[in-house]
Amino acid sequence: MSEIRIMRIGHRPDRDKRVTTHVALSSRALGASGICVDTYDPKLEEGIRSVADRFGGSYTIETGVKWREAVGKFDGTVVHLTMYGQRMDEALPKIPRDKDLMVIVGAEKVPPEVYQRADFNVSVGNQPHSEIAALAIFLYCFTGGSSLYSDRDGKMTVIPNERGKTVVENIPR
Ligand code: SAM
């Protein structure tokens, strides 16, 4: 399976801390391998690394990354999620499965250049909603939800339970 990376544009540390955290955590749960955020934000990095450290996997976060540079050196398909884009159900069959994928999501207004640079501008419905929802729906449809219950070999594992909470603390090997 190819890798999926997220590029978050327009992050404002004071206003977007929670939303960008959820963009990262949702994409991690749905199988992305990491996120680049355009504005430097060490607290955001710390929070995401702490979750990845406890719950496992190899999700990475880098902040202060210029989107043009990230896209410029990325060798794969670039998808920009925007309510103005083509329908997701029409775009999905055209997106290659054998290449790495970069998914761009905005916070505030995204520069027009992003629309030109993206290989696919994809809408998840054409109503304005949220980058967390748009990304989660897109990733679920792209991957079929194949990572939702994958074992990430973390310090803690949550065991599905019909009632209550079952968490296993794993002993380091
Ligand atoms: N007003 C901003 C603009 O014109 O770009 C949109 C801000 S919206 C709160 C933040 C991000 O959510 C967008 O940049 C886009 O990535 C995502 N988003 C919101 N609604 C979407 C939709 N219907 N389809 C795809 N992505 C969407």
Image (spheres, rainbow, N blue to C red):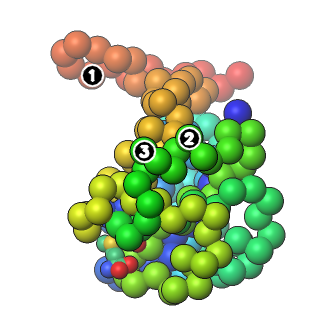
Q: From the image, tell me which residue sits under label 1.
A: 165
Circle 1 — which element?
Answer: loop
Task: Report if residue 157 is visible in the image.
Answer: no
Viewer-nearest of discs 2 and 1:
2
Residue 93 in the image: above or below residue 151: below
Quadrant location of the C terminus in the rendered image? top right
Q: From the image, tell me which residue sits under label 2.
A: 93
Q: Where is residue 140 in the image (x, y as percent from the top left)?
A: 44, 38
What amino acid type should be assigned to the residue bearing mark 2? Pro
Q: From the image, tell me which residue sits under label 3.
A: 89
| Label whose residue precedes the other's in the sequence (3 or 1) | 3
What amino acid type should be assigned to the residue bearing mark 1? Lys
Image quadrant, ligand 1: bottom left
Q: What residue occupies the far left of the structure in this picture? A: 163
Mark 3–mark 2 contact, CB under 8 Å? no
Residue 60 in the image: above or below residue 56: below
| Label whose residue precedes the other's in the sequence (2 or 1) | 2
Task: Report if residue 169 is visible in the image.
Answer: yes
Q: Is residue 164 left or right of residue 35?
A: left
